[in-house]
Amino acid sequence: MGITYHENTHIFHLFTESTSYQILLFQNAYPLHLYWGHRILEDLPASHLETAYRRNTILTQTPIDDPMFSREYLPFEYPCYGTSDFRSPAYQTVDCDGYRITDPRYIRHQILPGKPSMGPLPSSCCESDDEAQTLIITLLDRPHNLQIDLYYTVFPAYDVITRHTEFTNLSDRPIHLTRALSVSLDIKHGPAQMMELCGTALRETHVERRSLGTGMNGFESRRGFSSHQHNPFVALMNEDTTETSGEVFALSLVYSGSFTMQAERDMYGGIRLQSGINPCEFDWLLTSGEKFHTPEALMVYSCCGLERMSLTFHHFLRERIARGRFRFEPRPILLNTWEACYFTFTQESIMTLAKAAAKAGIELLVLDDGWFGRRDNDHSSLGDWYPDHTKLPNGISGLCEEINSLGLQMGLWFEPEMVSPDSALYRAHPDWCIHVPGYPRTQWRHQLVLDLSRKDVCDYLVQSVSSILSSCPIQYVKWDCNRRITEAASELLPAERSGEFFHRYMLGLYDVLQRITSRFPDVLFENCASGGGRFDPAMMCYFSQNWASDNTDAVSRLKIQHGASMVYPPLWITSHISASPNHQLDRPTPMEFRQHVSQPFNLGYELNLLQMSDSELAAVAQQIKTYQQLRPLIQFGDFYRLRSPFDGNETAWMISAEHGRHILVWYYKPYAQAEEAYLGIKLRHLDETAHYRLLDSDQIYSGSTLMYAGLTIDWHNGDHFSQFWHFERIADAAVSTEAVQEESL
Ligand code: DGJ
């Protein structure tokens, strides 16, 4: 498994356990896309290309320098514009004379063990050279001496192929890159639909599936960040693809800035699927000898539906994108003060809450917004990262010491990329925020964004966050980011580099995150951007978990978490049990329903325990004990979606852990319905000949019963019904046939 190149066929064959990807080196000049899909055993015949594009003889027999040669129907691996391919290009350039044409041709290739580093960009990594192989196809545009290296890394055991591109200016004249996507894929017999995760703040990662029309289809972020509106992920499939059947071609971009994701359907039904940095306002000046790396794209093919795609992403993101100590460690159960007290607290009130939290069994207390500068509301103080001594007379270290003395760990909220106009930082450095001289500085939540394309600003961020983190044993940081970028410019960038701003901001942010997370390897960092506004694989390289949404209403969370699970492992998706009625929607929900919605993910609390009755506090303590027992199964098991909240009034999820020994199932029905049909769910991926004991009961079921007859849902009148089952596979000898219950729908 890995990568082969056969001189006789001129085909590069990249293969994982169940996927093949083939590239034809066409007339020793152009790498063409031949195939991506189910694993096949041999190189495809050249006729595959001819049939696909219906231009048999012209296509493959006309020499590329013959006047009859046309690129129009060729499936290029990295297409350019301006000669005879009129579809969307993967990259574009402008040279010193204003010309925009390039014609890069093959000059060499290399196949390397492992995966070369991508420099300052976050990306997947391999732990040993024998678990991945990399193909680098080098193209050269001779008139400009512009070298383009196409990188393909194959992770056979993970069923993932990654791609990115590197540009090198080998000439002595500068050239502008005005578009530089990470990946371009010409998929023959293009699938009919695309699926994305979209929404807005409080309604993130909603699954949307739509038909692909002829011409351009797609979505993008122009907000400077990957955004609540569109996650940098797409899946192409046919109408009949389900969770468990049908082909899926999925891309996920390892990038946190503005991006594009597009699928152009051509006149023959072929799809050109592309993704990368959003070309809107992108213009990168490549001077002599300089290189430019695009972000990495992850490619996942599934021959058996969305479920297989998600499991592939979950394993890969958890093991080869995530870094650091917490990768394989269970995450602590935390209580966050935000919904408990917002900006209104004192050391004393926090300690009263902390005592109640410790009593309930909470493991970590997070002090959210409001602890620094003079921050009594969201109008001021971002940038002034020193404790407000009127609220915390003994500072953060004093509070930390007291919290630790209760046996609780302490966490702290920061929003380091931002500055309030009403802050000491802004008064000292009004030029440090992103702005265009002479124009108003658009505020959002009364704040501006610091210019992270500047080294001095990045250094300040590292120093200001580090000084708090080194002052006491803070064990967790919530890194927030509550606005988007406007007036995108930096005073330090020369005019000819102004189009580099957005990407330079991201490079600055990645550098800051790299420096801080490597300096504090024992701190667990959680990513947040008004909830899920920057929820992407690149952030997983620095953060061990992600606040999926500021909407903590349990009914809304069904859709948000279901959608997020398409790509992201449940371990990375934090889910907090909050008050009823809920603060965002004012909807009351029973405690058990809230518990069941948060339980299959990374559990936390967003509750004022001091306002709760003794019985509610006892329920919280019991929930924590239960979660602690289930935690290794939930956080490191395989997650399956049995029923979708996007299809109706029911949701069901399942986790299979310890090689199928433990099966956890959750069922939800938010709204009561009169004269309801029979309700039941069928489990998946059990051993049909094995037997499973339903814990806390003496019922035993065969795997075949659970999968084919299914579980009957209890009858319940009233809204917000949920049910949970925990099955454990039992050794055959322990099964007494009389005990086996044959349940059916
Ligand atoms: C937005 C976050 O998503 C919330 O959880 C909270 O931390 C607030 N910011 C604090 O300002």
Image (spheres, rainbow, N blue to C red):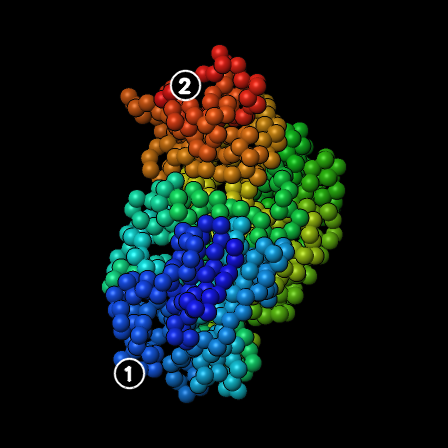
Compared to residue 442, the image places residue 602 above or below, namely above
The tag on residue 743 is 2
Report whether the residue tagged 1 is closer than 8 Å to ligand 1.
Answer: no
Q: Residue at x 39, y 22 (%)?
A: 712
Residue 486, image quadrant: bottom left
Residue 217 is left or right of residue 253, and the answer is: left
> Given the image, on which type of amino acid does mark 1 rest?
Pro
Q: Where residue 415 appears, x then y in whole percent?
A: 58, 54
For the residue pair 334 and 464, the one nearer the viewer reads as 334
Residue found at the very far top of the displayed protein: 738
Indicate the position of residue 199 as horizontal and vertical percent values: 39, 49
Name the residue nearer the viewer: 194 or 178. 194
User: Is residue 203 at least partly visible in the picture?
Assistant: no
Front residue of 497 and 141: 141
Mark 1 Cα-neighbour bin, 10 Å: few <14, some 14–19, many ≥20: few
Answer few, some or many: residues within 10 Å of disc 2's Cα (few below 14, many 20 plus, some between 14 and 19): some
Q: Which residue is mark 1?
A: 67
Cα–Cα gap, marks 1 and 2: 72 Å
Instruction: Check the image and report above or below for 591 versus 118.
Output: above
| Kind of residue at disc 2 | Glu
- Residue displayed at 33% across by 35% down: 648
